[in-house]
Image (cartoon, helix red, strand yellow):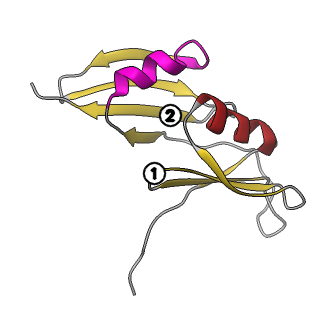
Amino acid sequence: MQIEKLIPVLWTEHVEESIHFYTEILPFQLSAHDREANWANVVWGEIEIMFSTPNAHVEQRAIGFTGSFYFRCTDVETLYHAISTKVKLIYPLEVFSYGMKEFGCYDNNGYILNFGEQIDQ
């Protein structure tokens, strides 16, 4: 057996708003959407994220996630300038001692998104 990839499924009560955030603010593209099932899939390069309302197979509990999603990218500064006025920032673009230039923000559901670029020091 070989695992091919990990695709997170983020629960939301607002699938349409999530599609808008990820495709209009971030550069993801909508690749699949089932309004009846309250489900969508977005892609950005090799990255895929699904959005869904909780289904009947899972005991209903509060929507949330502990942790963050870290996107390693190139040209993080351009992305930062493109979206920093459109998102709620956690921390602005800065260079860290571990060799990353990065920033953090919240998505429309409150999930934490970090974007970082490895830099030469």
Tell me which amino acid carries mark 2. Answer: Leu
Q: Is residue 50 left or right of residue 34?
A: left
- Return the mark for residue 22: none
* Mark 2: secondary structure: strand
For discs 1 and 2, the disc positioned in front in the rendered view? 1
Q: CA distance from mark 1 to mark 2?
A: 17 Å
Relative horizontal placement of residue 94, taking residue 109 as reference (left or right)? left
Magenta highlight on residue 88: yes
- Looking at numbered disc 1 in the image, what kind of residue is underneath it? Gly
Give, as a single range, the part of the protein colored magenta: 75-89
Q: Quadrant of residue 50?
A: bottom right
For disc 2, the marked residue is 113
Q: Earlier in the sequence, mark 1 or mark 2?
A: 1
Which residue in the protein does label 1 denote? 45
Q: Position of residue 48 (x, y in %)?
A: 54, 55
Residue drawn at x 75%, y 45% as measured from the top left: 12
Q: Residue at x 57, y 42 (%)?
A: 28
Element type at mark 1: loop
From the top left corner, tell me how far across and down residue 104 is, in percent.
Answer: 45, 25
Residue 18 sits above or below residue 89 on the image: below
Q: Is 79 part of what is drawn in magenta?
A: yes
In this rendered view, identify the residue nearer to me: 63 or 92.
92
On the image, the x and y values in percent for residue 110 come to 64, 31
Dot 1: few (<14), some (14–19), or many (≥20) neighbours within 10 Å?
A: few
In the displayed structure, 47 sits above or below 13; it is: below
Question: Which residue is situated farthest in the right direction here?
Answer: 36
In the image, farthest residue toward the left: 121
Q: How many marks?
A: 2
Q: Check whether the beta carbons of the residues at disc 1 and disc 2 lie within 8 A of each other.
A: no
